[in-house]
Image: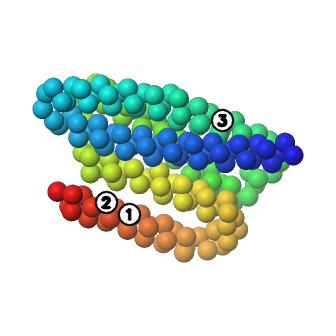
Amino acid sequence: MTYSILKSLHIIFVVSYFAGIFYMVRLFIYHTEALAKDEPERSLLHKQFCFMEERLWNIITVPALCIMSVTGIYLLYSTGWAYLTQGWMHIKLTGVILLLAYHYWSWRMIKALQREQTPYSSLRLRMMNEVATLLLFAIVFAVVLKDFFLRYWWATLISFVAMGVLIMLVVKIVNRIKR
């Protein structure tokens, strides 16, 4: 029973974390665009976006990451670390490591935008927003499909590359239409 409850909590906080990280990068896009505006609109929007980013990061994203991590580690521990010998778990954990790098990148973006620095264009940020989507797909498919995912790794890889290219093309098309 404890395992099922913790697994449920793990899933809930994975969803919460991804909601936070998806919205965070969306705020970066709006914040970057706001910094290109004229005063006084620029300063007002900058202040508001800093407030929103800080709140989202500290109240939703980081706590969800912490609870997601603790429950995930406990789930591994409760199985006697047996999943660590399985290939699908290696893929999942690789995705989690990449997600942690993305989390760190997001934290750095918050700090840069607070200093009114825009290291990336809004188009580049739109593309970066899709990195989390691709990681989510890879992690979920690895967990759900397990051995099938590994057995047909070449088809999986081709599918993810195709999906990434498709997402990037859609972002570019939408950006052109928006202009």
Residue 19 at x, y = what percent? 51, 45
- Which is more toward the observer, 72 or 38? 38
Q: In whole angstroms, how far apart are the C-alphas of marks 1 and 3?
A: 30 Å
Tag 3: Cα neighbours inside 10 Å, few (<14), some, or many (≥20)? some
The residue pinned by badge 2 equals 171
Q: Quadrant of residue 112?
A: top left
- Amino acid type, label 1: Ile
The residue pinned by badge 3 equals 67
Q: Extreme left residue here?
A: 38
Residue 141 at x, y = what percent? 61, 63
Residue drawn at x 53%, y 34% as measured from the top left? 60
Residue drawn at x 47%, y 42% as measured from the top left? 21
Q: Quadrant of residue 105?
A: top left
- Amino acid type, label 3: Ile
Q: Secondary structure at mark 3?
A: helix
Residue drawn at x 44%, y 67% as measured from the top left? 163
Indicate the colouring scheme. rainbow
Verify CB contact (< 8 Å) between mark 2 and mark 1.
yes
- Which is more toward the observer, 20 or 77? 20
Q: In whole angstroms, how far apart are the C-alphas of marks 2 and 1?
A: 6 Å
- Which is more toward the observer, 168 or 17? 17
Q: In the image, is residue 33 above or below residue 128? A: above
Is residue 101 visible from the viewing direction of this image? no
Verify CB contact (< 8 Å) between mark 1 and mark 3.
no
Residue 157 at x, y = what percent? 51, 68
Q: Is residue 29 left or right of residue 65?
A: left
The residue pinned by badge 1 equals 167
Sequence-first disc among 2 and 3? 3
Residue 30, which numbered label? none
